Image: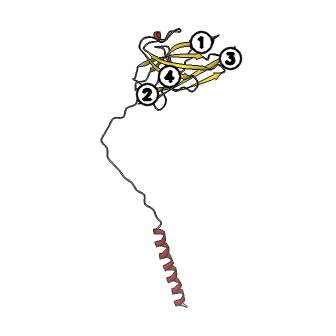
Amino acid sequence: MNIKFGRYWALAAASVVVLVFASAQTTGALWRDEAVVAGGTITSGTLDIKVGPSGAEVNNYVLAALGSTNLGPNGYSQAPLSIRNSGNVPFNYRLQGTTLTGTVPLSLTATKVSAAANCPTVGAPSGSTTALFSGNAHGAQVPAAPAARLLAAGANEVWCFRLTASDDPPKSQSSTVTFSFRADQV
């Protein structure tokens, strides 16, 4: 009987050895790496885009001058908008999108001018101008993504916006255009 129990112990010990070897083959390894880099300087800055009258830009601005009552067929309204980098780092920006609410179909023309005075309420923009966009006022993106305009810290640009009614606008109706700008750190 003593020999019989010895065999069971030997079988049990062999099973444990097989179990230990089987589990050791399913373990994984955790890899780690290190590297030393030369010292550097980390700086931070302020990214702040403002819009509105030149010299008094704000975060949200109602461009009331870009509107008209009793706008007839092919009639337009035109007004300047200053876009300023009020931060201390340069950024890339664009007119991210426009939304048009209402029933009057409008087309949009955007022109970069050198000063607000070069965007009269009547007539074409004057002085040094750069055409930026001409098309449907709804869904406009200027320039089209992924392109953007670079604006240095403290600098500004003046855009001349013109909204033009269609040749047969609905009578006694109105529309509102909302402009959304986006700025990304360079």
The N terminus lies in which quarter of the figure?
A: bottom right
Q: Report the side of 61 relative to 154 (left or right).
A: right
Q: CA distance from mark 2 to mark 4?
A: 17 Å
Amino acid type at circle 3 is Pro
* Residue 46 visible somewhere in the drawing: no
> What residue is disc 3 on?
170
Amino acid type at circle 4 is Phe
CB contact under 8 Å: marks 2 and 4: no
Residue at 42% in and 58% down: 30
- The numbered mark, 4 or 1, whose residue comes first in the sequence reads 1
> What residue is disc 2 on?
92
User: In front: mark 3 or mark 2?
Assistant: 3
Q: CA distance from mark 1 to mark 3?
A: 13 Å
Amino acid type at circle 1 is Gly
Per the rendered image, the range of residues in magenta is 36-57
Count neighbours of disc 1 (C-alpha within 10 A) and say few if under 14, some if 14 to 19, many if 20 or more: some
Amino acid type at circle 2 is Asn
**Which x, y percent locates residue 64?**
58, 13
Per the image, is 152 magenta? no
Q: CA distance from mark 1 to mark 2?
A: 33 Å
Which quadrant of the structure image shows residue 135?
top right
Residue 75, numbered circle? 1
**Which x, y percent locates residue 10?**
49, 83
